[in-house]
Amino acid sequence: MFGYIGPDRPYLFIKDETLYKAMYCGVCRCISKECGQMARTALTYDIAFMSALLHNIRGEDVKIVKRRCPVHPIKRRPMTEADELTRTLACVNTALAWYKLTDDKQDGDARGALRFLYKKGYKAVLAKHPQVAEIISRQMSEQSALEKAKCDSIDMACEPTAQMMLQLSRYLLGEKATAHTDGLAYALGKWVYLMDALDDYDKDVKKGRYNVLYLNYGAKTREEAMKKGEGELVFVFDSLFADMRTNLFNIKFYFNHDLTDNIILRGIPQRTRRLVYGQACKNGRTVKNDE
């Protein structure tokens, strides 16, 4: 994951903030046990969101306990107990980090040099969940092929990441997977890819790296690209938000889902507006740079 998924915190209940942080710490603890201490450095709140979402859809409640951690050794912190799903998500997070840094290394990005930190963890993933590594590897290869071909179709460029999220959700949900969980995961994957393309736009242009939005709009800066492609991008994002809402409302949840509703219905659109326009919205209305 890329670290873009998060809640709209002013509208987040205290109970959900506690659960969110507990799931984050729970996955972190599982990463250390499943993939080694160094792999913990790749953890993002995206996986905490996935933990909350998937536990609820699978109907598996979590137990929160208080424990100390290496970063906060003095005061015990609430964290979820390890279970099968959390352990698997720990492996997913490590595999995603490994392949993301592999991609960075191939692109000549300095961050790629950090891949060695996750070598031990990646080997653990191969031993415990080879299906996870296979799904990510296959879709990353598809992504690499599109980049080498200079694909200028936004939909096609998003497809490998969208398919990766869909297939990982099927693997993690098992018999609980449905057409609507597929649809939600697919839309989330497509959104993540576009957010990454937007976030890296200026850096990609400067370093001459592939960026599907640059191939479409040809602008030297993200701000100029947004002016040229605003209508198309707003349509694409609004379509994704509509897909997320439709699929979300048709998924059976076993517990309270205020946390994931906040993230999907409020946090994701808010984060999109911040990146597209450079600032948050006021009173529910998008504020452009010239207002």
Image (spheres, rainbow, N blue to C red):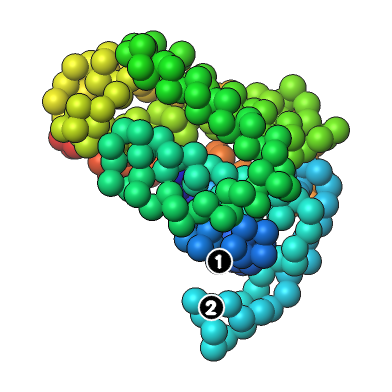
Residue at point 81%, 35% (across, down): 174
Mark 2 or 1, closer to the camera:
1
Residue at point 56%, 40% (across, down): 264
Badge 2 marks a residue whose secondary structure is loop
Q: Is residue 76 left or right of residue 43?
A: right
| Residue identifier under label 2 | 70
| Residue identifier under label 1 | 37
Residue at point 65%, 24% (across, down): 183
The reply to whether dot 2 and dot 1 touch (C-beta < 8 Å) is yes
Comparing 253 with 122, the one in front is 122
Q: In the rendered image, is residue 244 in sight? A: no
Q: Quadrant of residue 120?
A: bottom right
Position of residue 238 relative to residue 117, above or below, is above
Along the polypeptide, which appears first: circle 2 or circle 1? 1
- Percent position of residue 166, x then y: 64, 28
- Percent position of residue 198, x then y: 32, 32
